[in-house]
Image (cartoon, rainbow, N blue to C red):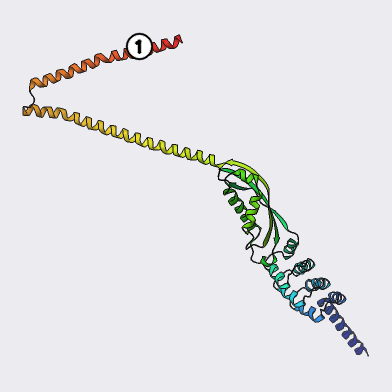
Amino acid sequence: MPSTSVGIIIILGVIAVLLVFFFTFVPITLWISALAAHVNVSIGNLIGMRLRRVSPSKIVLPLIKAVKAGMDISVDELEAHYLAGGNVGKVVDALIAAHRADLKLPFERAAAIDLAGRDVLEAVKMSVTPRVIETPNVSGVAKDGIELLAKARVTVRANLDRLIGGAGEATVLARVGEGIVTTVGTSLSHKEVLENPDAISKTVLSKGLDAGTAFEILSIDIADVDVGRNIGAQLQTLQAEADKNIAQAKAEERRAMAVAREQEMRAEVVAAEAEIPRAMATALREGKLGVMEYYDMQNIVADTKMRESISKPNKQQSQLKTSGDYKDMKDQK
């Protein structure tokens, strides 16, 4: 009798351990929630999720939400996306939002967008409610040399078909800025742009700037246009300064060449004068120059030097007299 009681106690203990393990391993509450929401999830599926290290709550709860929203999504699709590293909850929310907005977004594309690293729910919201992107001040110079600073507001909507592999907002802003610069640059005068700023919008929109991007440009509105610097005048000033420097450099070069030529000619004169005594000695030795002729020439040289020494003080006095007369005339004034 005592052995029978011990056996019953052991059996009850084993059953209790098995029940605790079962209720711990199998999320019965999730199964009951799915059963109440008419979602076909078996206990075997829940055990399989545990064995595959998949959190059952991250699969069952989004599945219940999708079924209640009237969407046909299987457990295997959600589990495969979870195992691939995707955000199941955000994908289901995006599918529900697209379904409510009557947007065609299959589960495969939504899962691919999520795995590509983009926020699929934000993309769906942006498809329903377009976003306004404001560009910084874009500088453009008209043909008359006047700089214009334009600021635009770009209204874009997410394109779900091009969201994978499409360029982002930075590319859209860069292309819009390029279109503004091109439009201003082709204008004959900055006044034309100020009179018709909508011409910038029309020209930029006609270029199809949203090609290859994840967005669709709905409108481009010029918010503000300001007049900047006179770039043409500044460039002409810089060009004139450069031409002046070039002319000064060429003049300095010519002056240096003239000075060098003058020094060369003086050197030639000094060299020629150095040959005079030798030529006179040769002439005396060969009898081509007489002694009396030599003395006559020396007398002429001495007489010339005497005349020059007498005329120098007279020149200085005349210069002093001229400067004194000028000073007297200035004092009289």
Q: Residues within 10 Å of mark 1 (few under 14, many from 20)?
A: few
Residue 316 or 11: which is nearer the viewer? 316
Q: Quadrant of residue 8?
A: bottom right
Q: Which amino acid does label 1 sit on?
A: Lys
What's the residue at 20%, 18% (across, down)? Answer: 304
Q: Is mark 1 on a helix, strand or loop?
A: helix
Q: Quadrant of residue 71?
A: bottom right
Q: x, y (%) of residue 175?
A: 61, 56
Is 278 on the left or on the right of 98, as rendered? left
What's the residue at 50%, 40% (across, down)? Answer: 236
Residue 146 or 92: which is nearer the viewer? 146
Q: x, y (%) of residue 151?
A: 66, 48
| Residue 30 in view here | yes
| Residue 85 in view here | no
Is 86 on the left or on the right of 38, as rendered? left
Q: Residue at label 1?
A: 321
What's the residue at 92%, 87% (across, down)? Answer: 5
Residue 191 or 275: which is nearer the viewer? 191
Q: x, y (%) of residue 156?
A: 70, 58
Residue 199 or 14: which is nearer the viewer? 199
User: Is residue 237 depicted above or below 84 in this figure?
Assistant: above
What's the residue at 65%, 54% (across, down)? Answer: 202
Q: In which quarter of the image is residue 39?
A: bottom right
Q: Quadrant of the N terminus?
A: bottom right
